[in-house]
Image (cartoon, rainbow, N blue to C red):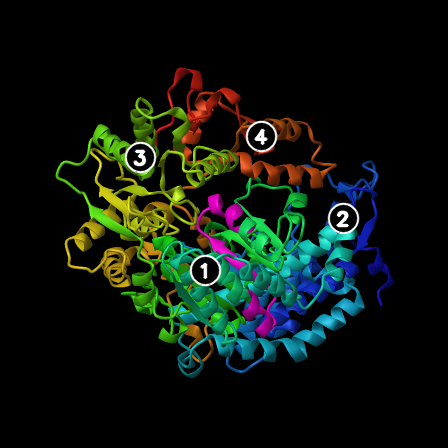
């Protein structure tokens, strides 16, 4: 053993100056990464990349840097390094990548070792930056260039000499004997026979190899961050090691079954909900795979899917259940329903809510350490967070990816999947289903045709017909039909006063009415139109310009009035139509996609309680109207959806909400949008026309491996560029904390907390502030900045709050002072 190597430092703890030996950090990260990579039967690969990820820290240059940075070297001594502006400029990730590359590439006569070595070297070389490009968009072989980097910059030769003998010996043993055969066996499982026979890397094979790389990368990132965090705060390690494994699912099952047994059966709707729940229970013991749960809105999907998931997790000894939900606005509602059902309080680690993050993109490393990694039995997150975990650049999202293995993924309202992410999503989900011991459930009343895509060569789902958890979907929809759809479209469209009159007439005759519009501008216009004739206590406005806490309070008032039989007229944007448990007597829906109309209909007569004057049960009324002068040119999903809905409305269907009508709608809609499903990239963004699926698979910039015809091809993905280009939503948003009720105190504390010394408190405040934040698009952000409406909580922090005078009790965030009554309309 090289005794001198024991002096090498990995980290210095800020609290007390204690030094973490480099060999200790490497071996501990290797141990964690090995355990995480066991999920895909690649423990030795995980161990090797963990052991070598910081191998470059054995260089004298890095040790001088870290000792100078922590004042361990006197500034007057010759070895002192002025670290100002130097962070990240001493390369300590390439040396370990070179070790793996040199050791593995010589194995296998047909290039097997090179491919294995490239995958692992990519993980190590990228563990601070996010996965690097193998081939850049301008045709540079970036991986080759990295592996050919000058030794003066990588310090590879020096690290080989200086490293702990036990680290070097273990790494060489793993590289020589264990890793390549194990990883090659895994590669053979994730690619097609054509790749093995003909050495041809098609789109799906290349995508799968990229996902395998990202999975191992995720294991390394999480292991590294966990160990670093546990060194900073040793109690973290104790808590992690004390976690009960396997998860005691039976305890949650017993609580849920007791809860379900106590639910009342008041009418036919409750009876059908109970039947759906029982069908889910009956299917829970079936094999893992991909399933659908196609249930009309109000059919009890949340509890039925939870019942399936808990029993399925116990049967197959899975690690977690992850709910992927379209909007942050309904995460808290669903989390509350789940906690109530399994008797888990907000401080119980059983249920984790992961909302959109208020943290700035450029975080300090300590803030990265405390970012959540979905390590709870039940996780609720958004589709945006899920897609960013799969495809975003950097390390923050990728860290969580391995948690998708050995899990159940429940996609709530799957029809809201962004159209440009369809093929990416299908390929990624197939990878996890086929190779990572994962089960997926696609929940919705309007099942999209993800298994019948026009360009199937780019990837689609394969869903056996018998994998429908709800049983006979057609019969179920007929039995649960509680509304009538009224096609009220007319030439020229409806004026605001006409729509207001329709809504007020329904309010007066039936007691409650919900109006759902497509834009915030129309919501405000109708609210102001109705405010002249409707009692203030009965009139409500909802939009995403209001923070979640504000919307929750308003929804609480709305539900309380509805349950008490008091009049309610609510004007809302689309946020209310997916998963929000409200029950109106009538609904007016602006023309949109038929899937959105079906969701809106689910807010009408939801519990089947409507009766006529004689006490007989009747159907609720849903009116589809087309407004005069609606500005939706920048909303292509709505615009195309409107066109296809109008087409379906002209056809003979028993019901416009029946599965057959929804299927026809998606056939029209998907055919129209087929070219958008690979995530197109324009010449303006990357210099030429391509798509993100290409960058993450066999890459159009790849001219072929002419000199490798007799060998297996290497990866040619542009991982980093793809990460830069990927956005789960059309435009990036900026979170702004608003001073609504408790938001005022949170802003005060965030402005005062010394985050360098109390990172835990700072992060707690950020999490609490999520309920008091509004996400705004770039054009709105510019207006807020120009009007001096926003301010940083602390200089350079990247976290902003809204001045009080720019927030309205009626409409929420405004680009103008609310005293001027000039509200935000976008």
Q: Residues within 10 Å of mark 3 (few under 14, many from 20)?
A: many
* The N terminus, quarter of image: bottom right
Q: CA distance from mark 3 to mark 4?
A: 34 Å
- Image location of residue 213, percent across then percent down: 53, 65
Rendered image: mark on residue 493: none
Q: CA distance from mark 2 to mark 3?
A: 59 Å
* Disc with the residue nearer the chain's start (2 vs 3): 2
The percent coordinates of residue 427 (x first, y second) are 42, 66
Of the numbered discs 4 and 2, the one sitting upstream in the chain is 2
Q: Which residue is mark 2?
A: 232
Q: Quadrant of the C terminus?
A: top left
Disc 4 versus disc 2: nearer the observer: 4
Q: Position of residue 422 (x, y in %)?
A: 37, 59
Mark 1 vs mark 2: give the one in front. 2
- Residue 324 on the magenta span: yes
Kindly indicate whether the residue at mark 4 contacts the one at mark 1 (C-beta within 8 angstroms). Answer: no
The mark nearer the N terminus, 3 or 1, is: 1
Between discs 1 and 2, the one toward the N terminus: 1
Instruction: State the residue position of label 3.
Output: 507
Q: Which mark is residue 743?
A: 4
Left or right for 262, reference 685: right
Q: Which residues are magenta?
A: 310-335
Callout 2: 10 Å neighbours few (<14), some, many (20+)?
many
Coordinates of residue 310 in the picture (x, y in percent): 56, 65
Q: Which mark is residue 135?
A: 1
Q: Is residue 252 visible?
A: yes
In the displayed structure, would residue 262 be above or below residue 312?
above
Image point 76% across, 48% down: which residue? 232
- Element marked by disc 3: helix
Q: Nearer the viewer, mark 3 or mark 1?
A: 3
Mark 1 or 4, nearer chain start: 1
Q: Can you tell which quarter of the image residue 691 is in?
A: bottom left
């Amino acid at each position: 053993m090289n005794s001198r190597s024991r002096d090498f430092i990995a980290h210095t703890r800020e609290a007390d100056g204690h030094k973490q030996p480099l060999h200790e950090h490497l071996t501990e990260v290797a141990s964690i990464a090995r355990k995480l990579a066991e999920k895909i039967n690649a423990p030795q690969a995980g161990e090797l990349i963990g052991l070598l990820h910081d191998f470059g820290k054995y260089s004298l240059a890095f040790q001088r840097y870290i000792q100078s940075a922590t004042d361990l070297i006197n500034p007057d001594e010759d070895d002192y390094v002025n670290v100002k502006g130097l962070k990240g400029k001493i390369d300590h990730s390439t040396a370990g990548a070179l070790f793996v590359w040199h050791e593995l590439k010589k194995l296998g006569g047909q290039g097997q070792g090179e491919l294995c070595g490239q995958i692992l070297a990519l993980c190590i070389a990228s563990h601070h930056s996010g996965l690097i490009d193998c081939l850049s968009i301008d045709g540079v072989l970036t991986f080759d260039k990295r592996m050919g980097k000058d030794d003066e910059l990588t310090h590879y030769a020096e690290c080989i000499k200086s490293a702990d003998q036990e680290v070097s010996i273990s790494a060489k043993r793993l590289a020589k004997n264990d890793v390549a055969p194990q990883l090659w066996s895994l590669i053979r499982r994730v690619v097609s026979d054509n790749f093995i026979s003909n050495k041809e890397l098609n789109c799906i094979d290349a995508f799968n190899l990229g996902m395998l790389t990202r999975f191992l990368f995720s294991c390394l990132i999480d292991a590294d961050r966990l160990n670093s965090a546990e060194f900073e705060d040793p109690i973290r390690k104790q808590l992690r090691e004390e976690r009960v494994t396997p998860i005691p699912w039976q305890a949650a099952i017993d609580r849920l079954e007791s809860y379900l047994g106590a639910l009342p059966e008041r009418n036919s709707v409750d009876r059908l909900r109970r039947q759906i729940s029982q069908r889910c229970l009956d299917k829970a013991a079936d094999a893992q795979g991909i399933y659908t749960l196609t249930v009309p809105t109000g059919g009890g999907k949340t509890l039925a899917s939870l019942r399936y998931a808990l029993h399925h997790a116990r049967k197959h000894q899975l690690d977690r259940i992850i709910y992927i939900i379209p909007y942050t606005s309904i995460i808290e509602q669903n989390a509350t329903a789940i906690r109530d059902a399994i008797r888990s309080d907000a401080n119980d680690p059983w249920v984790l809510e992961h909302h959109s993050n208020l943290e700035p993109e450029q975080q300090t490393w300590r803030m990265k350490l405390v970012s959540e990694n979905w390590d709870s039995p039940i996780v609720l997150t958004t589709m945006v967070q899920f897609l960013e975990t799969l495809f975003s650049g950097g390390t923050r999202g990728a860290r969580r990816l391995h948690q998708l293995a050995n899990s159940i993924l429940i996609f709530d309202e799957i029809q809201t999947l962004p159209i440009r992410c369809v093929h990416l999503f299908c390929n990624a989900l197939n990878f996890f289903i086929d190779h990572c011991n994962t089960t997926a459930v696609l929940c919705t009343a309007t099942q999209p045709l993800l298994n019948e895509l026009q360009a199937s060569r780019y990837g689609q789902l394969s869903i056996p017909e018998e994998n429908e958890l709800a049983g006979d979907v057609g019969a179920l929809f007929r039995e649960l039909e509680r509304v009538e759809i009224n096609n009220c479209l007319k030439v020229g469209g409806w004026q605001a006063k006409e729509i207001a009159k329709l809504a007020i007439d329904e309010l007066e005759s039936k007691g409650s009415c919900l109006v759902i519009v497509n834009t915030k501008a129309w919501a405000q216009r109708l609210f102001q139109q109705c405010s002249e004739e409707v009692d203030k206590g009965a009139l409500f406005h909802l939009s995403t310009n209001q923070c979640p806490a504000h919307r929750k309070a308003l929804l609480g008032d709305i539900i309380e009035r509805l349950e008490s039989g008091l009049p309610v007229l609510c004007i809302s944007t689309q946020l209310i139509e997916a998963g929000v448990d409200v029950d109106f007597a009538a609904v007016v829906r602006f023309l949109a996609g038929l899937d959105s109309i079906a969701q809106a209909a689910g807010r009408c007569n939801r519990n089947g309680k409507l009766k006529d004057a004689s006490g007989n049960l009747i159907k609720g009324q849903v009116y589809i109207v087309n407004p005069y002068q609606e500005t939706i040119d920048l909303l292509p999903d709505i615009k195309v959806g409107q066109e296809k809905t109008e087409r379906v409305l002209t056809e003979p269907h028993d019901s416009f909400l029946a599965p057959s009508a929804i299927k026809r709608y998606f056939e029209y809609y998907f055919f129209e949008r087929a070219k958008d499903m690979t995530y197109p990239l324009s010449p303006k963004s990357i210099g030429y026309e391509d798509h993100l699926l290409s960058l993450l698979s066999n890459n159009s910039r790849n001219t072929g491996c002419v000199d490798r015809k007799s060998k297996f091809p290497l990866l040619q993905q542009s991982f980093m560029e793809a990460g830069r280009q990927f956005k789960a939503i059309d435009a990036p948003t900026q979170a702004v904390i608003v001073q609504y009720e408790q938001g005022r105190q949170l802003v005060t504390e965030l402005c005062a907390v010394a985050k360098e010394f109390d990172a835990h408190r700072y992060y707690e405040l950020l999490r609490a502030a999520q309920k008091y934040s509004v996400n705004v698009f770039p054009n709105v952000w510019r207006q807020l900045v120009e009007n001096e409406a926003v301010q940083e909580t602390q200089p350079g922090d990247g976290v902003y709050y809204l001045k009080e005078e720019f927030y309205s009790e009626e409409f929420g965030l405004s680009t103008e002072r609310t005293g001027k009554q000039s509200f935000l309309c976008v």
